[in-house]
Amino acid sequence: MNSIDLIRMGLGNLLRRKTRTFLTVLGVVIGTAAIVTMLSLGFGMQHSFQQQISRMGSMTVIDVYPSYDGGYYGVTSSRGRSSSASSTLDDKAITQFNQLEGVQAVSPEIETYLRLVSGRYVGDMLVKGINPEIMADFVPEISEGRLLQKGDGANLVFGSQTIYNFYDGKARDPWRYMGYYDGSEPKVNVLKDKLTLTFDFSYGMRRSPGEQGTSKQPRLYKVKGVGILQQGQNESDYVAYMNIDELKKIIQDNARNQNGNDAASRQALQEQLKYQRAKVKVKDIKYVQGVQDAINEMGFQTHSLNDILKSMQEQSRTIQLILGGIGAISLLVAALGITNTMIMSIYERTREIGIMKVIGAALRDIKRLFLFEAGMIGFLGGLLGIGISFLLSFLLNTLSGSAGYYMGMGGEVKISVIPLWLVFAVIALSTLVGLVSGYYPARRAMKLSALEAIKTE
């Protein structure tokens, strides 16, 4: 019996008993749809985790801190060594980071809180020093103006929210307006208005009658705003950036002006000018773990959004196993249904099987015929089950999107995601379940005695 005859006969047998075939296929459809829908909820959760984390910053950026007991600002690493001379975050360490495989750029950071003054308006903000040549690797795209460039002096690039930090320092109660954003336009045009920078946080404020100023006149530095970043929903929104070399000069000049040049002051200045953190950008997310491990081995503390993602993925995998197990129970019941259908088919076709053997059909052909029928039931059930799964996924995402919109979460809320590989995997699985379920009935049909089968009424 050639393959075409086998397929024609197998399909004919399935169509001859339409109701039984339909009900058996329906069982596989329900089982397949249950597995895919349950797993899609797990994948949707994982997709949601990734979206939430990506809003917090780049997945390819690693934060590196000097290694102190207990970590730096609460950042710890189980792989980091205890602090030592080798874990000093300096230019030598930055060079070592740059030499690691997969590293695209490394930016050391120093930061300090400063006051910007423009006319009667003052604004307090965190200013970070950054290397202008690699700034584009670590901040969102520019919204207005430009990024810092090599050779830039006292120029600033503002995070999207820092432009709202300005308030009227001459008002009777200026503190109530500090950091308050009422939805109006920024009080200062940071790209056009004149800006003055100072370390004195009383400068530009309304003085009470009889109030004395500081004993030593603070240094004032003329600065210029050259750019505003797009909103990135991370720390860059609340930071202003300056050329790291220029920021060092300003810190040094202010320290000498305020504290003099004695040994204690110089020591304090050196501590202030130490790199507080470095950011390492890798070429692809696949390099993150390897680069983190290498930096930890050098004795530094590291942190990346990949750490959070890994923890969330572990939770997601556990939930997927539970949901997939629930769906698998339905498919197991469907498998028993296929076995039952094929055994009943043997009882009904015993005489037909005997005639096939008498006219010369090989035992292998009889086995293949029953396996084909069982496999076809599994294949059709898997195919239709995938279609039902996509429909359910669409309905779930539509409903969750509507709920998210009315709850202020936006319309892009996906709680069900069906990856392409899952489609092919489930169709293959349902077909395999059909073949396995039909194996025992096929063996039984193959072993029937031809003479006894012909005598069967």
Image (cartoon, helix red, strand yellow):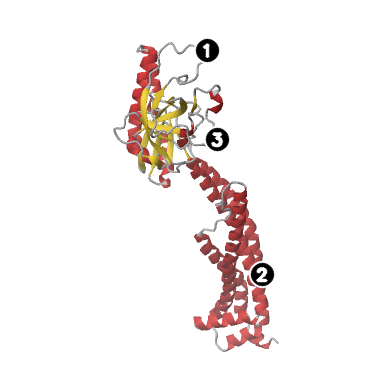
Q: Earlier in the sequence, mark 2 or mark 3?
A: 3
Query: Which amino acid, mark 2?
Result: Gly
Question: In 3D space, how far apart are the residues under numbered discs 2 and 1 (Cα atoms)?
Answer: 92 Å
Residue 51, compared with residue 128, is above or below; it is below
Q: Position of residue 171 (x, y in %)?
A: 52, 23
Question: In 3D space, how far apart are the residues under numbered discs 2 and 3 (Cα atoms)?
Answer: 65 Å
**Callout in the foreground (3, 1):** 1
Dividing the picture into quadrants, the one containing residue 87 is top left
Query: Pointers 3 and 1 in contact (CB under 8 A)?
Result: no
Would you say 429 lies left or right of 242 here? Answer: right
Question: In this orientation, does residue 352 appear?
Answer: yes
Q: Earlier in the sequence, mark 3 or mark 1?
A: 3
**Foreground residue, 306 or 202?**
202
The circle drawn on residue 182 is 3
* Pointer 2 residue: 337
Q: Earlier in the sequence, mark 2 or mark 1?
A: 1
Question: In 3D space, how far apart are the residues under numbered discs 3 and 1 (Cα atoms)?
Answer: 30 Å
Q: How many marks?
A: 3
**Foreground residue, 352 or 270?**
270
Query: Which amino acid, mark 3?
Result: Asp
Query: Which amino acid, mark 1?
Result: Pro
Q: Residue furthest right?
A: 457
Quarter of the image where the C terminus is located: bottom right
- Identify which residue is drawn at 59% across, 49% down: 318
**Foreground residue, 399 or 390?**
399
Dividing the picture into quadrants, the one containing residue 41 is bottom right
The circle drawn on residue 91 is none
Question: In this orientation, does residue 266 appear?
Answer: no
* Pointer 1 residue: 209
Q: Residues within 10 Å of mark 2 (few under 14, many from 20)?
A: many
- Identify which residue is drawn at 55% across, 77% down: 368
Q: Residues within 10 Å of mark 1 (few under 14, many from 20)?
A: few
